Image (tube, grey):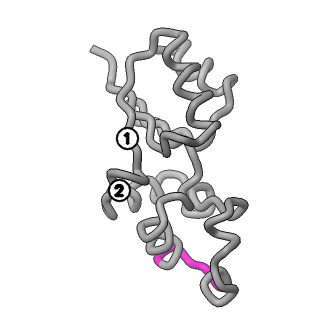
Amino acid sequence: MPAPVVIHGIKACDTMKKARVWLETRGVPHDFHDYKTAGIARDKLAGWVAKVGWEALLNRSGTTFRKLPEADRAGLDEGRAIDLMLAWPSMIRRPVLETGGALIVGFKPEIYAKTFAAA
């Protein structure tokens, strides 16, 4: 039985919508976790950070991050970045796709195609 696929993100996000449509049109069964409404556990987020690094997960180009006071944005490290993403899940880059042992951050159709071609 293939490993479950879970796509994490925010329901209203356009990139999330594209990723979910991609999975659905190709018949890839998946669960959706909306971390804006349901939250995200610290240990789950820390596990992602261990795999891909906080820099890959923290969405610095989003409105939520840009609206932070300069003092909160300056001198970020892993711990502070995790705290920010837990406090404001909108700062987590989307989507985050878990499949088997793989973690894919962001939506790139060619990466999804390569990942699911091997499945």
Quarter-of-image position of residue 115:
top right
Relative to 73, 53 lies left or right: left
Q: Nearer the viewer, residue 112 or 36?
A: 36
Residue 19, percent from left and from top? 58, 28
Q: Determine whether the residue tagged by mark 1 lies in a helix, strand or loop.
A: strand
Residue 15, percent from left and from top? 63, 37
Q: Nearer the viewer, residue 76 or 10?
A: 10
Relative to 92, 29 lies left or right: left
**Given the image, on which type of amino acid does mark 1 rest?**
His
Rendered position, 113 above or below 70: above
Q: Determine whether the residue tagged by mark 2 lies in a helix, strand or loop.
A: loop
Q: Which of pointers 2 and 1 lies earlier in the amino acid sequence? A: 1
- Give the residue number, with chain letter if any, for mark 1: 33
- Give the residue number, with chain letter if any, for mark 2: 39
Residue 116, percent from left and from top? 52, 17
- Crowdedness near tag 1: few (<14), some (14–19) or many (≥20) residues, C-alpha within 10 Å: some
Residue 92 colored magenta? no
Rounded to the nearest whole Å, what is the CA distance between mark 2 and mark 1? Answer: 9 Å
Q: What's the magenta bit mostly, secondary-structure-wise?
A: loop
**Given the image, on which type of amino acid does mark 2 rest?**
Gly
Rendered position, 62 above or below 74: above
Residue 65, percent from left and from top? 64, 69
The stretch in magenta equals 75-79
Residue shown at the point (57%, 36%) measured from the top left: 16
Q: Which mark is residue 112?
A: none
- Crowdedness near tag 2: few (<14), some (14–19) or many (≥20) residues, C-alpha within 10 Å: few
Rendered position, 105 above or below 51: above
